[in-house]
Image (cartoon, grey):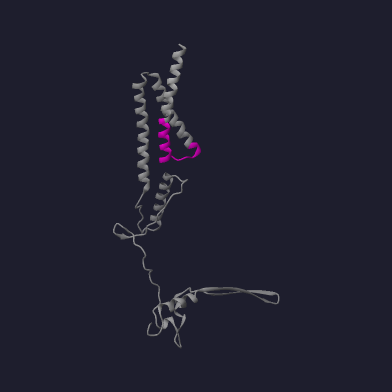
């Protein structure tokens, strides 16, 4: 192409000029109004082959000196799964959606894709729900372990069987009521809500001890 005086930028400009939409005009002929649209879109390979380009004093078409066809675009990035070329798609949930619902819907969608496209393989390469489930499981264990340990320690320090028993009954009752409130309002059980429950149980135990001690002292004074 250099010998013909044609550079790569000349071909790019020629293709761009022939792939534009000039617009439309209104032409009135008596009672009739015509809308004339001028467009020069490149729709087929033959349209590109027939593009004219000027080389010095000669007017040539692209097909006269170039091979024009459909080529695969040069890959900009690569993703491999199990040693094979693959396409990676990231799905991020909204803040208001539930992780359990997203996981079940993803499984249903993958099963549908496997039925519609049996020649392709679909799999989840990274699943952050596993990490979240593990964190939530640890918080649940901490919640129950902290409540039981606090209940046992109160027997040794309060030196009274009734007061720790009252607090021990109030802890699971409060948790049940809180989870019922979660269900009615539509809140999800996640890391933040469980952490709040853990802190709430600790504050409830502290406040219960203070209230019971004040009640005990008031009873002793009245006696």
Residue 133, above or below 75: above
- Residue 220 seen in this snapshot: yes
Residue 190 visible (yes or no): no
For residue 19, above or below residue 158: below
Q: Nearer the viewer, residue 206 or 115?
A: 206
Q: Main secondary structure of the magenta part?
A: helix
Where residue 68 sits, quadrant-wise, is bottom left
Tell whether 95 sits left or right of 128.
right
Q: Quadrant of the C terminus?
A: top left
Q: Which residues are magenta?
A: 183-202
Q: Is residue 122 above or below residue 211?
A: below
Q: Position of residue 98 (x, y in %)?
A: 44, 44
Residue 37's spot in the image, x, y percent?
58, 74
**Residue 157, how many percent across, how many down?**
35, 22
Residue 153, quarter of the rendered image = top left
| Nearer to me, 168 or 210 | 210
Looking at the image, which is closer to me, 177 or 220?
220
Q: Which quadrant does the N terminus fall into?
A: bottom left
Q: Assess whether residue 121 is covered by the magenta stretch.
A: no
Query: Is residue 195 within the magenta segment?
Result: yes
Residue at the image point whose x is 37% and y is 44% from the top: 132
Q: Residue furthest right?
A: 31
């Amino acid at each position: 192409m250099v010998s013909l005086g044609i550079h790569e930028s000349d071909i790019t400009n020629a293709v761009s000029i022939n792939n534009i939409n000039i617009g439309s005009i209104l032409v009135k002929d008596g009672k009739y109004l015509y809308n004339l649209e001028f467009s020069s879109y490149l729709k087929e390979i033959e349209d590109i082959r027939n593009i004219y380009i000027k080389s010095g004093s000669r007017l040539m078409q692209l097909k006269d000196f170039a091979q024009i066809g459909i080529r695969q675009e040069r890959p900009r990035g690569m993703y491999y799964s199990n040693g094979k070329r693959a396409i990676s798609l990231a799905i991020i949930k909204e803040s208001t959606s539930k992780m359990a619902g997203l996981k079940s819907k993803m499984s249903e969608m993958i099963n549908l894709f496997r039925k519609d496209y049996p020649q392709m393989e679909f799999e989840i390469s990274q699943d952050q729900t596993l990490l979240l489930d593990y964190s939530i499981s640890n918080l649940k264990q901490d919640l129950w372990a902290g409540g039981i340990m606090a209940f046992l320690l109160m027997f040794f320090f309060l030196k009274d069987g009734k007061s720790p028993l009252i607090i021990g009954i109030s802890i699971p009752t409060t948790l049940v009521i809180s989870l019922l409130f979660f269900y009615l309002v539509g809140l999800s059980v996640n890391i933040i809500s469980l952490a709040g429950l853990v802190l709430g149980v600790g504050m409830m135990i502290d406040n219960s001890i203070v209230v019971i001690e004040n009640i005990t002292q008031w009873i002793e004074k009245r006696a």
